């Protein structure tokens, strides 16, 4: 059974860089045809897609965050990571890592595996 | 692509039929998913491709629609279905979510 687990600091100071890692177990992150990504949810609010990285290495980012976001993969550790620079209080949220299967014969799949989420608070 | 959901919240009783609507700002074919989220938990995929039930999801959940208008229906609401429901468009990046519909107990 595939499992995803987020890790990283729960408190980040304003203007600094938020860094999170997602460790994938029960499957290989190098497997073809999957997107690995990040989604966040501010307290009491809705879901916001941050970005994804395809198994090939292609990245896709939310334009609202694009200038501050980097998603990368470390296949040797079966992990992928999120870096969000110049954070403000508006970046306080629960951050989820997630997996989505790529299109197969015209079928586009939803996000079927999620981490449990990790709360990151931006505060001095 | 912007998604709107209606209603934003609803109160219903066990056994009720519940319908939630999601509308896209432009056509997205059938590239829509529905999720259920309970407090303190990650969202759970219910339906993808607008109408395909994810493995393990009870058959009382169903989805329909294409283009810009979509519907999630719960045929007979169960106690464990009280949650917030989100739609997500997968037609193009950036992927976007609807604002959510909270279903609570009447």
Image (tube, coloured by chain):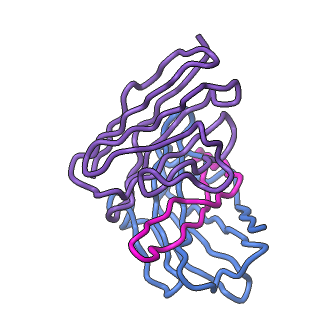
User: In the image, what residue occupies the spot 50% across and 44% down?
Assistant: A89
**Palette colour of chain A:** blue
Please give the name of the residue rendered at 60% of the width and 62% of the height, measured from the top-left corner.
Answer: A98
Quadrant assignment, res B75? top right
Q: Which chain is purple?
A: B
Residues in magenta, as a range? A95-124
The answer to which image quadrant residue A16 occupies is bottom right
Q: Quadrant of the C terminus of chain A?
A: top right
B52 lies left or right of B32: right
Q: Residue furthest left?
A: B26
- Which quadrant is the N terminus of chain A positioned in? bottom right
Of B32 and A121, nearer the camera is B32
Instruction: Give the residue drawn at x 69%, y 38%.
Output: B40
Q: As displayed, is residue A8 above or below residue B74?
A: below
| Percent x, y of residue B33 | 46, 52
Is A115 magenta? The answer is yes
Determine whether B42 is above or below A104 in the image.
Answer: above
What is the total number of numbered labels drawn onto the structure image?
0
Note whether A112 is above or below A72 in the view shown.
above
Residue B60 included in the magenta stretch of the image? no
Q: Position of residue A76 (x, y in %)?
A: 72, 89
Q: Position of residue B10 (x, y in %)?
A: 48, 19
Judge whether A63 appears above or below B41 on screen.
Answer: below
Between residues B27 and B64, which one lies in front from this camera angle?
B64
**Foreground residue among B12 and A111:** B12
Residue ID at (53%, 15%):
B11
Q: In the image, residue B91 lies at what x, y percent?
A: 33, 62
């Amino acid at each position: 059974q595939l499992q995803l687990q987020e890790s990283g600091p729960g408190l980040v100071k304003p203007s600094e860089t938020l860094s999170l890692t997602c460790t994938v177990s029960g499957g290989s992150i190098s497997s073809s045809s999957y997107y690995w990504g990040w989604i966040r949810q501010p307290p009491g609010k809705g879901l916001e897609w941050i970005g994804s990285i395809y198994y090939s290495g292609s990245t896709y980012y939310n334009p609202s965050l694009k200038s501050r976001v980097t998603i990368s993969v470390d296949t040797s550790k079966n992990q992928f990571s999120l870096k969000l620079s110049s954070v403000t209080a508006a970046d306080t949220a629960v951050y989820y890592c997630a997996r989505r299967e790529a299109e197969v014969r015209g079928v586009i799949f939803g996000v079927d595996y999620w981490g449990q989420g990790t709360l990151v608070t931006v505060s001095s | 692509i912007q998604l709107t959901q209606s209603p934003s919240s609803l109160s219903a009783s066990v056994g009720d039929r519940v319908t939630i609507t999601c509308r896209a700002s432009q056509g997205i074919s059938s590239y829509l998913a529905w999720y259920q989220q309970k407090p303190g938990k990650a969202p759970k995929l219910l339906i993808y491709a607008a109408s395909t039930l994810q493995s393990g999801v009870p058959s009382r959940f169903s989805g329909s629609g294409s283009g810009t208008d979509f519907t999630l229906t719960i045929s007979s609401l169960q106690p464990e279905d009280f949650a917030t429901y989100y739609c997500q468009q997968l037609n193009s990046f950036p992927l976007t979510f609807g604002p959510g519909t909270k279903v609570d107990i009447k």
